[in-house]
Amino acid sequence: MTPKNQLDAPQRSPRWSQVLAAWRNGEENRQFLVDVAALNGLLVWLCLMIALDHVTLAPAVLALITISIVPIALNYSRFSAYAPDALIGGQIVTYSLALLFVGAADWLTVVPFGVLIWGYIILLRGIASMVSWSGLLGMGWLIMTRFLNPSLDFSADVLSPLVLFTGMIVIFGLFNQRRQPIIPAIAPHLTTAQTATVTNAGLAILAEQIGDTAKQLDQAAGTNHSITTQQSSRADQQTNVVAEANRELDDFRYLALQARSKADEMTHLAQQAVSVAQNGNETIQAALEGMRYTRESVLMVGQTIGQLALHLRHISQIITSVSDIATQSNFLALNAQIEAARAGEQGRGFSIVAEEVRDLAEQSRRATGDVRMVLKEIQQAISLAVDTTESGAQGVEAGLNQAEEAGAVIASLYETIARGDMAAKAILSSIDLQSDGVRRLGTAMQSLDQVAMQNQASTRMAENISQDLSRLSGKLMATIFQSESHAGVS
């Protein structure tokens, strides 16, 4: 079917079988469908930029979307049977998203800008499709830097447009190869003279625009080189800091091991001290019980000796009475003997009895004297025993008091040692927690070291990209100069 017949064909939405058939029919069909896919991709990119709060970039994205519609518009009359609603649907979705996410004020700015872009449709047909795909390339880089590898986030705002400019450079090279097919594509719309005029003017404008883009690309490459240099320096500093922190962690880990060993030793000694103090407390308590028993015994002995002294005083009183009786008996016997002597021969027998009584009284008196002397010695011994018992009781009481004080001191020492043992165990637990924290910190430092290494690799990659962009911008400027020279010659 000729293009004219296609133009006269009824406008209808294609089925999948028609789309597949269009894909198999030729390169132009495939290119048209690829352009439609690129348009859809740019719409997705617009949504992504808005979701990432890059609203300020929305007009530029909408401009790219408008440019991507250019090949669809140029080929609409030739392939209307395959995609009749691609252009209309794309415009509706584009400006609807702009109105919904960007706002009415920005939307009123974007729409006129898009209308102006339509003035360059014929001139930009050769690069419109590649702009779409370069936009998709920038979207892919943005997804990688924002979601897949957040450590590259520092260069996302710089590298995304740089990747886009790189696509523009590739576009320019392909444009030189596709300049000739552009003329037949726009032939149905322009006369031959208009074609030459528009083509030369468009090429001049395009060369100027690409030259400005190359300058911006060179500036962006310089800025990116400065940023990557700073990032490389910071990455080196971060690597040095991480290495120093790892050395400090090793020293702290060694000190923690020593502290753990000392804490174990202290805990062992504290447990021994607790055992000794407990044994000492038990011993002093047993000694206190023995001393209390001794004090009770001494008091009982003192009471017994006191009762014995009382009995001795009673005996002494009885002996005194007996001595008095013996003395009186002696006097009575003497009187009886005197009276018997007066009686003469008749009182001779009575005199003998009186003499015997007198002798008995004298013996009783001497015996009571001896007993009194013995009792006196016993009383002296009892007094000494009482004094000794009282001194012993006082000594036992003082020893008991001292033992009780010693027992209180030992009990306090036992409690102190027990608290020391608990403190040693708490210190040991704290050291274990510190050691665990050091291990976790060491793991975190290893992760940080890995991130620093990744940052260094990313920085080197960005620096290589910057250098490549600088070389490509130089080649682009040289190509523009050669194109302008050839245009002047022609």
Image: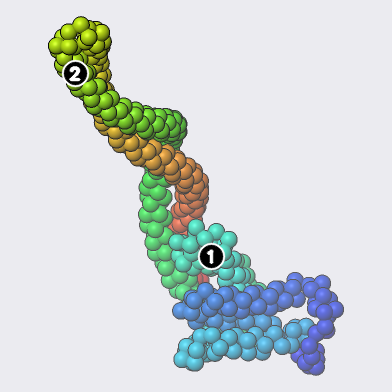
Residue at the spot of label 2: 332
Q: Secondary structure at mark 1?
A: helix
- 217 with respect to 388 (left or right): right
Asked if residue 362 can be seen in this view, the reply is no
| Residue at which label 1 appears | 146
Residue type at the position of mark 2 = Leu
Q: Nearer the viewer, residue 478 or 403?
A: 403
Q: Residue at x 80, y 93 (%)?
A: 10
- One can see residue 14 in this view: yes
Which of these two is toward me, 180 or 476? 476
Q: Crowdedness of circle 2 by 10 Å Cα count: few (<14), some, many (20+)?
A: some
| Residue depicted at 41% across the width and 40% down the height | 418
Q: Is residue 95 left or right of residue 399?
A: right
421 vs 342: above or below: below
Image spot of residue 424 (x, y percent)? 41, 39
User: Is 251 located above or below residue 169 in the figure?
Assistant: above
Q: Name the amino acid type tagged 1.
A: Arg
Q: Position of residue 295 (x, y in %)?
A: 34, 31
> Image quadrant of residue 219?
bottom left
- Percent x, y for residue 226? 37, 57
Q: Residue at x 48, y 71 (%)?
A: 210
